[in-house]
Protein backbone atom coordinates (compact mmCIF):
# COMPACT_ATOMS: atom_id res chain seq x y z
CA UNK A 1 0.00 0.00 0.00
CA UNK A 2 1.50 3.29 -1.09
CA UNK A 3 0.59 6.57 0.50
CA UNK A 4 -0.08 9.54 -1.72
CA UNK A 5 1.94 12.72 -1.22
CA UNK A 6 0.28 15.73 0.43
CA UNK A 7 1.04 18.00 -2.52
CA UNK A 8 -0.72 18.06 -5.82
CA UNK A 9 1.37 17.36 -8.92
CA UNK A 10 -0.38 19.99 -10.94
CA UNK A 11 0.47 22.95 -8.65
CA UNK A 12 3.59 24.70 -10.07
CA UNK A 13 4.12 26.88 -6.97
CA UNK A 14 5.14 23.98 -4.77
CA UNK A 15 8.73 22.73 -4.63
CA UNK A 16 8.94 19.00 -5.03
CA UNK A 17 11.25 17.23 -2.53
CA UNK A 18 14.39 15.61 -3.89
CA UNK A 19 15.76 12.27 -2.83
CA UNK A 20 18.66 12.59 -0.37
CA UNK A 21 22.09 11.39 -1.53
CA UNK A 22 23.75 8.52 0.27
CA UNK A 23 27.13 9.91 1.50
CA UNK A 24 28.77 6.50 1.13
CA UNK A 25 27.72 6.10 -2.49
CA UNK A 26 28.62 9.72 -3.25
CA UNK A 27 32.24 9.27 -2.08
CA UNK A 28 34.97 9.01 -4.73
CA UNK A 29 36.55 5.89 -3.24
CA UNK A 30 33.23 4.03 -3.28
CA UNK A 31 32.61 5.02 -6.89
CA UNK A 32 36.10 3.92 -7.96
CA UNK A 33 35.75 0.61 -6.14
CA UNK A 34 32.34 0.02 -7.73
CA UNK A 35 33.73 0.86 -11.17
CA UNK A 36 36.64 -1.54 -10.65
CA UNK A 37 34.32 -4.33 -9.51
CA UNK A 38 32.11 -3.83 -12.57
CA UNK A 39 35.13 -3.94 -14.88
CA UNK A 40 36.42 -7.10 -13.21
CA UNK A 41 32.99 -8.68 -13.55
CA UNK A 42 32.89 -7.84 -17.26
CA UNK A 43 36.38 -9.32 -17.73
CA UNK A 44 35.42 -12.43 -15.82
CA UNK A 45 37.85 -11.90 -12.95
CA UNK A 46 36.86 -12.91 -9.46
CA UNK A 47 36.65 -10.67 -6.43
CA UNK A 48 39.61 -12.49 -4.88
CA UNK A 49 42.00 -11.33 -7.60
CA UNK A 50 44.17 -8.34 -6.75
CA UNK A 51 43.75 -4.89 -8.30
CA UNK A 52 46.22 -3.85 -10.95
CA UNK A 53 47.94 -1.24 -8.76
CA UNK A 54 48.57 -3.76 -6.00
CA UNK A 55 49.97 -6.30 -8.48
CA UNK A 56 52.32 -3.68 -9.95
CA UNK A 57 53.55 -2.60 -6.49
CA UNK A 58 54.22 -6.20 -5.45
CA UNK A 59 56.06 -6.81 -8.72
CA UNK A 60 58.26 -3.76 -8.09
CA UNK A 61 59.02 -4.85 -4.51
CA UNK A 62 59.94 -8.33 -5.72
CA UNK A 63 62.24 -6.92 -8.43
CA UNK A 64 63.86 -4.57 -5.91
CA UNK A 65 64.61 -7.45 -3.52
CA UNK A 66 66.07 -9.52 -6.35
CA UNK A 67 68.23 -6.57 -7.43
CA UNK A 68 69.50 -6.05 -3.86
CA UNK A 69 70.43 -9.72 -3.52
CA UNK A 70 72.31 -9.64 -6.82
CA UNK A 71 74.21 -6.52 -5.73
CA UNK A 72 75.16 -8.17 -2.44
CA UNK A 73 76.40 -11.28 -4.25
CA UNK A 74 78.43 -9.16 -6.67
CA UNK A 75 79.91 -7.22 -3.75
CA UNK A 76 80.98 -10.51 -2.17
CA UNK A 77 82.52 -11.67 -5.45
CA UNK A 78 84.41 -8.42 -6.01
CA UNK A 79 86.31 -8.42 -2.72
CA UNK A 80 89.84 -7.11 -2.80
CA UNK A 81 92.76 -9.51 -2.18
CA UNK A 82 93.32 -7.87 1.21
CA UNK A 83 89.73 -8.59 2.27
CA UNK A 84 90.01 -12.18 1.06
CA UNK A 85 93.17 -12.69 3.11
CA UNK A 86 91.53 -11.21 6.20
CA UNK A 87 88.59 -13.53 5.75
CA UNK A 88 90.90 -16.56 5.46
CA UNK A 89 92.77 -15.59 8.64
CA UNK A 90 89.50 -15.06 10.48
CA UNK A 91 88.30 -18.51 9.44
CA UNK A 92 91.60 -20.07 10.55
CA UNK A 93 91.32 -18.39 13.96
CA UNK A 94 87.77 -19.68 14.34
CA UNK A 95 88.94 -23.19 13.51
CA UNK A 96 91.75 -22.97 16.06
CA UNK A 97 89.33 -21.78 18.75
CA UNK A 98 86.97 -24.68 17.99
CA UNK A 99 89.83 -27.17 18.22
CA UNK A 100 90.92 -25.73 21.57
CA UNK A 101 87.37 -26.00 22.88
CA UNK A 102 87.23 -29.65 21.79
CA UNK A 103 90.52 -30.35 23.55
CA UNK A 104 89.29 -28.64 26.71
CA UNK A 105 86.12 -30.76 26.66
CA UNK A 106 88.19 -33.93 26.66
CA UNK A 107 90.51 -32.69 29.41
CA UNK A 108 90.05 -34.04 32.96
CA UNK A 109 87.98 -32.03 35.42
CA UNK A 110 90.88 -31.00 37.71
CA UNK A 111 92.68 -29.29 34.79
CA UNK A 112 89.58 -27.23 34.00
CA UNK A 113 89.25 -26.15 37.63
CA UNK A 114 92.96 -25.27 37.78
CA UNK A 115 92.61 -23.05 34.67
CA UNK A 116 89.61 -21.29 36.17
CA UNK A 117 91.59 -20.61 39.36
CA UNK A 118 94.44 -19.12 37.37
CA UNK A 119 92.04 -16.77 35.60
CA UNK A 120 90.64 -15.46 38.86
Image (cartoon, rainbow, N blue to C red):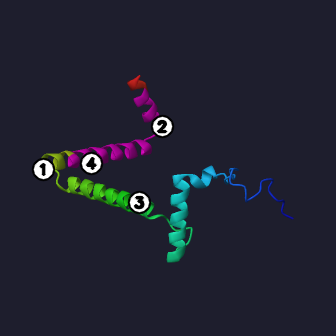
Please, what is the dominant secondary structure of the magenta stretch? helix
Q: Quadrant of the N terminus?
A: bottom right
The question of residue 45 being in magenta is answered with no
Q: CA distance from mark 1 to mark 3?
A: 39 Å
Frontmost residue, 107 versus 88: 88
N-term-proximal mark, 1 vs 3: 3
Proximity of marks 2 and 1: CB atoms separated by less than 8 Å: no
Residue wearing tag 3:
58
N-term-proximal mark, 1 vs 4: 1
N-term-proximal mark, 2 vs 3: 3
Q: CA distance from mark 2 to mark 1?
A: 44 Å
Residue 16: give x, y in percent of width and height.
69, 53
- Disc 2 or disc 1, which is closer to the eye? 1
Quick one: label 1, few (<14), some, or many (20+) residues within 10 Å? few
Residue 91: image tag: 4
Secondary structure found at label 4: helix
Residue 8: give x, y in percent of width and height.
77, 57
Q: Is residue 114 above or below residue 38?
A: above
Quick one: label 3, few (<14), some, or many (20+) residues within 10 Å? few
Q: Is residue 7 above or below residue 101?
A: below
N-term-proximal mark, 2 vs 1: 1
Residue wearing tag 1:
81
- Disc 4 or disc 2, which is closer to the eye? 4
Frontmost residue, 77 versus 33: 33
Proximity of marks 1 and 3: CB atoms separated by less than 8 Å: no
Q: How many marks?
A: 4
Q: Which residues are magenta?
A: 87-116
The question of residue 108 being in magenta is answered with yes
Proximity of marks 1 and 4: CB atoms separated by less than 8 Å: no
Q: Is residue 96 left or right of residue 15?
A: left
Amino acid sequence: ILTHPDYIDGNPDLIKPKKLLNPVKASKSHQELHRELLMNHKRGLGVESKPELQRVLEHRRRNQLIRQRKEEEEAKKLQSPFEKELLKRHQRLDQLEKEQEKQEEHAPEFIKVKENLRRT
